[in-house]
Amino acid sequence: MNIKRETIVLKNDLSEIRKIRETVEKFGEEHKLSPDDIFDMNLALEEIVVNIISYGYKTNEMRSIKVDLSIDEKILTLKTEDDGVGFDPTKAPPADVNSSMEKRIHGGFGIHIVKNIVDEIEYKRENNKNIFIMKKNIKTYFKK
């Protein structure tokens, strides 16, 4: 088993989102992931981290969000960890994708996108932290 891993720590500020893109692109290129997998990884992480920053904290106090990327054979694992308000995305109601834009209830589309990008999601709350894990079967992976 040859697990490759990258970890970044972000502040709970939307300006930090660019760090996700930079890290994901570097990680994907280093490990020869397909452009589709790099795009999907970026989109899924950005959606989750934006939700954490936008809804997870009741105050403007600076907090940290840990993001782990790892790859083992053909499984890509994306993990976020934060100490914001508890929220289990696996239990979020489905997004209303069939109504007109005017009738849709705000919210839920980020989680809907993530559920359609990755193959498996898991949530747990441990030691007052949200731990959200996304796993994706990758399309192309060329070992070095």
Image (cartoon, grey):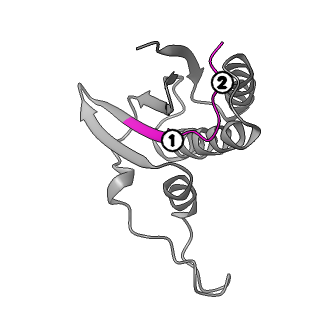
The residue that mark 1 highlights is 137
- Left/right of residue 117 with respect to residue 92 in the rendered view: right
Q: Nearer the viewer, residue 5 or 74?
A: 74
User: Is 66 placed above or below 125 here?
Assistant: above
| Disc sitting over residue 142 in the figure | 2
The magenta segment:
132-144
Q: Nearer the viewer, residue 129 or 37?
A: 37
N-term-proximal mark, 1 vs 2: 1
Q: Residue at x 39, y 37 (%)?
A: 132
**Left-right relation of 7 to 94:** right
State the quadrant of the N terminus: top left
Q: Residue 67, can we see it?
A: no
**How far separated are the C-alphas under marks 1 and 2?**
14 Å
Which amino acid type is shown beneath numbered disc 1? Asn
58 displayed left or right of 29: left
**63 w.r.t. 35: above or below:** above
Task: Classify mark 2: residues with Cα within 10 Å, few (<14), some (14-19) or many (20+).
Answer: few
Q: Amino acid at mark 2?
A: Phe
